[in-house]
Image: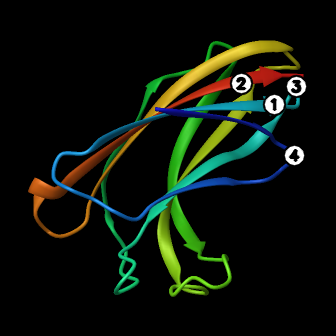
Amino acid sequence: MTASRTSIRGATIALLLVASSAGIARAETIRLDVPAGYSGRLWSFYAYNQDTCADVAIRGHSVLRQPKHGTVSLRIEPKRETRKGKKCFGKSFKALYVYFRAKGRYKGGDAFEVRARHTFNASERNMVSQRVRFVLDLK
């Protein structure tokens, strides 16, 4: 499990998973400073095969726990690899975006959890499940 703290000012935070073995379950905790009343993208998940630049199939996603002081929605949208020097630079992939909408101008702590499932080939035996817990500090 890893943890990080980031300030949100309209930026998208991306987690890229590029390696797999059968049955991996990854857990992540991300701590974010978010402006009170924020509404927009918080995070994106995308994965691709480093050798072929092929999309990894997103096989399911869900909000496991909603925040107390807002709502979370998940959407699959295109995302372009923007990291220069990467083999797949400029290619577009399917990404799972996490959107957060604060209720009012609440200030304080909040948290929610999401899950993304994907496979690196057509076989379900290589299913990877990613759980991400977001801990928000609304300021």
Asked if the residue under mark 1 is in contact with the one under mark 3, i.e. CB atoms within 8 Å, the reply is no
Per the rendering, the mark at residue 9 is 4
Of callouts 2 and 4, which one flags the residue occurring earlier in the amino acid sequence? 4
Q: Nearer the viewer, mark 3 or mark 4?
A: 4
| Within-10-Å neighbours for mark 1: few <14, some 14–19, many 20+ | some
Q: Where is residue 8 drawn, in percent x and y?
A: 81, 42
| Within-10-Å neighbours for mark 4: few <14, some 14–19, many 20+ | few
Per the rendering, the mark at residue 36 is 3
Q: Amino acid at mark 3?
A: Ala
Tell me the CA gap for discs 2 and 4. 13 Å
Q: Where is residue 103 drawn, in percent x and y?
A: 76, 21
Element type at mark 4: loop
Residue hosting label 1: 33
Tell me the CA gap for discs 3 and 1. 9 Å
Q: Nearer the viewer, residue 131 or 100?
A: 131
Where is the C terminus found, in terms of image quarters? top right
Q: Amino acid at mark 4?
A: Arg
Q: Amino acid at mark 2?
A: Leu
Residue hosting label 2: 136
At 25% from the left and 66% from the top, the residue drawn is 120
Element type at mark 3: loop
Per the rendering, the mark at residue 70 is none
